[in-house]
Image (cartoon, grey):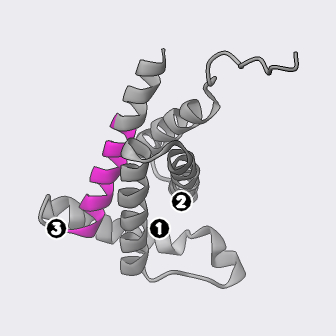
Amino acid sequence: MALLFSAIRVLLGLFFSVCGVVKLTDRISGEVYEQLKSQFVQFADAFPLKEFGYKPEPIQYLETVGWIELAAGLLMAFGPQLLQEISNFVLTIVMIGAIYSLLVLKEPIAMCAPATISLGLLLLLNIRGRGRPTKSKFE
């Protein structure tokens, strides 16, 4: 079972890394990059902290999310356990923000599916058992 969770962690980390790279450059897919740029104009309008007076610039928002996904994805896939757990938490927050933005923009449910599935896998990795608890020498 541990091998299954390790495979999910590595694949999910690589998925987030690729998603981050796509947000950072048009060299992988210019069409997708342009589509993301236009989507992040809408996402900036639906930004959760907008109610408190902060609205990010769409391009900076896109790049920030891209770098976070790239770095956290790589650390989740290949980093030490502590950094994997921190990356999982950070990516969970990013996915909650993505789902929130899509719901505020009243996008179709199909648009929420990738973020929802990713969030579900992140939560699965976060709450999975760590195996049998070890007995202390004092028991």
- Which residues fall within the magenta stretch? 11-26
Q: Vertical placement of 19 versus 136: above or below?
A: below
Give me the residue at 14% from left, 59% from top: 29
Magenta: main secondary structure equals helix
Q: Earlier in the sequence, mark 3 or mark 1?
A: 3
Q: Vertical placement of 49 versus 10: above or below?
A: below
- Where is residue 14? Give x, y as percent: 31, 44
The amino acid type of the residue labelled 1 equals Phe
Give me the residue at 46% from left, 25% from top: 5
Discs 3, 2 touching: Cβ within 8 Å: no
44, 129: nearer the viewer: 129
Q: Secondary structure at mark 2?
A: helix
Indicate left or right for 134 with 22 as reference: right
Quick one: label 2, few (<14), some, or many (20+) residues within 10 Å?
Answer: many
Residue beneath disc 2: 101
The amino acid type of the residue labelled 3 equals Asp
The amino acid type of the residue labelled 2 equals Ser
116, 103: nearer the viewer: 116
Q: Secondary structure at mark 3?
A: loop
The mark closer to the camera, 3 or 2, is 3
Discs 2, 1 touching: Cβ within 8 Å: yes
Q: Earlier in the sequence, mark 3 or mark 2?
A: 3
Indicate left or right for 123 with 72 as reference: right
Q: On residue 43, which mark appears?
A: 1
The mark closer to the camera, 3 or 1, is 3
Residue beneath disc 3: 26
Please identify the quadrant where the C terminus is shown: top right
137, 98: nearer the viewer: 137
